[in-house]
Image (cartoon, rainbow, N blue to C red):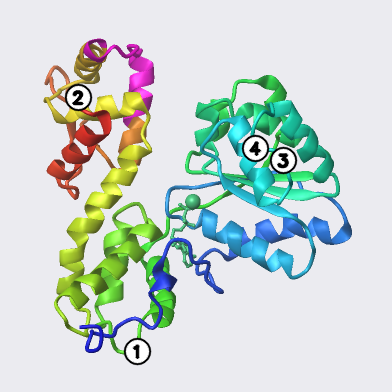
């Protein structure tokens, strides 16, 4: 079995989300801006703090990693990267471990670890806090407060949420962490196609992919908020489908088979990113019909009460609803309200997503 296996991949790891390619497509502007700020280091200055924002799969993480790798060729600066999902204490410890600082793992408080950290980073250090919104759900602004007050530390925050800094209400943090913002927009189908083309040349042997495969993956991912992760998943799943059938040539039909699996994974990820109230809101949307925001509001608060969750104001609810719409998880139809003609408002599951997939992922996530 191992001997006459189908051989499609030159290197499958190239399709992994962890792989940082040599060349990136469609992000020249952002890469240049990032590099310009970081180039201050070459003259011995500390760059300003940076905040990278943009939707999921828009290349934020990969661009930052790519630029930092280039930077290493020019200047010897310690870099510590972490996904910022944890408390201040946990994150500070893992940042310290990445930098190979020796700290006893038990019996130290935040300020003990901070004292070591402060001393060891005084010659300059870059700290990357990826998915930064997660730390603000815990006590993470404390960590940011300490880091941003240290003279030679440059913090690069990354987040899917444009309004991530609104999650911080400690004024001391807001006055010491005043980052330059770099925005990433969703990829369009052409950019996705260029990304896939380049990655597939490294990943597959020549001629393995039918001509229509890459454009199809790109077009489908463009419909999913231009998420490059979705596009790459689609491509690697399609190849797996083909291998499973012991063929050596990936077709558009394989992509369509792969799509369902990738779709479920995409929806799962989208839902995991929602707040508790948004999950409940989405659940209430998909379990009843509504003709006005007020009806949604009433039903939501009834469910929230049953679940023992704090009720929301109508204003807050309408913000959450707009966000779900932006994420492509609901569609809202707003007809001009004809005089006295009643119904001018309706909510739908998005026409391109299977309602069943959303419900399944949602039930799992809120444990109903
Ligand atoms: P984000 O951090 O914005 O959610 P990532 O940086 O993780 O997105 O990108 C998602 C996937 O798409 C990763 O596998 C990444 O390598 C790939 N990718 C994103 N943008 C590009 C690009 N411009 N060129 C090549 N690959 C890319
Ligand atoms: Mg990321």
Q: Which residue is mark 2?
A: 284
Disc 2 from disc 1: Cα separation? 49 Å
Q: Residue at x 21, y 61 (%)?
A: 259
Please state which of the two labelled residues, at mark 1 or mark 4, is closer to the viewer. Answer: 4
Tell me if residue 11 comes above or below residue 206 in the rendering.
above
Q: Nearer the viewer, residue 122 or 148?
A: 122
Q: Which residue is mark 4?
A: 105
Circles 4 and 2, Cβ within 8 Å, touching? The answer is no
Q: Position of residue 152 (x, y in %)?
A: 82, 44
Q: Which residue is mark 3?
A: 103
Element under label 3?
loop
Please state which of the two labelled residues, at mark 3 or mark 2, is closer to the viewer. Answer: 3
| Magenta run includes residue 308 | yes
Element under label 1?
loop
Of callouts 3 and 1, which one flags the residue occurring earlier in the amino acid sequence?
A: 3
Disc 1 from disc 4: Cα separation? 50 Å
Q: Nearer the viewer, residue 52 or 264?
A: 264
């Amino acid at each position: 079995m191992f001997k006459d296996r189908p051989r499609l991949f030159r290197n499958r790891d190239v399709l992994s989300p962890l792989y940082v390619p040599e060349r990136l497509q469609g992000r020249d502007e952002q890469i240049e801006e990032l590099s310009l700020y970081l180039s201050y280091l070459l003259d011995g200055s500390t760059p300003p703090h940076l905040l990278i924002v943009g939707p999921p799969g828009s290349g934020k993480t990969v661009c930052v990693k790519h630029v930092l790798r280039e930077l290493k060729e020019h200047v010897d600066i310690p870099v510590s990267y972490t996904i910022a999902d944890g408390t201040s204490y946990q994150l500070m410890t893992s940042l310290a471990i990445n930098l190979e600082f020796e700290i006893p793992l038990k019996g130290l408080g935040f300020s003990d670890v901070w004292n070591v950290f402060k001393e060891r980073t005084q010659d300059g250090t870059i700290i990357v806090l990826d998915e930064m919104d997660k730390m603000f759900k815990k006590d993470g602004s404390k960590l940011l407060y300490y880091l941003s007050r240290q003279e030679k530390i440059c913090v690069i925050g990354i987040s899917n949420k444009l309004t991530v800094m609104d999650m911080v209400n400690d004024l001391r943090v807001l006055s010491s962490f005043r980052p330059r913002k770099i925005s990433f927009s969703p990829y369009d189908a052409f950019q996705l196609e260029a990304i896939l083309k380049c990655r597939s040349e490294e990943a597959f042997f020549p001629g393995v992919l039918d001509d229509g495969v890459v454009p199809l993956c790109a077009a489908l991912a463009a419909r999913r908020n231009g998420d490059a992760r979705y596009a790459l998943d689609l491509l690697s799943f399609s190849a797996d489908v083909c291998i499973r059938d012991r063929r050596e040539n990936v077709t558009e039909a394989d992509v369509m088979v792969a799509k369902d699996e990738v779709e479920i994974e995409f929806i799962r990820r989208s839902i995991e990113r929602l707040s508790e109230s948004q999950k409940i809101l989405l659940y209430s949307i998909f379990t009843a019909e509504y003709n006005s925001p007020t009806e949604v509001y009433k039903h939501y608060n009834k469910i929230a009460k049953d679940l023992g969750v704090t009720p929301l104001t109508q204003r807050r609810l309408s913000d959450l609803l707009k966000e779900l719409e932006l994420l492509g998880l609901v569609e809202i139809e707003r007809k001009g309200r004809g005089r006295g003609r009643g119904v001018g408002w309706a909510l739908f599951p998005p026409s391109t997503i299977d309602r069943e997939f959303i419900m399944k992922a949602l039930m799992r996530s809120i444990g109903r």
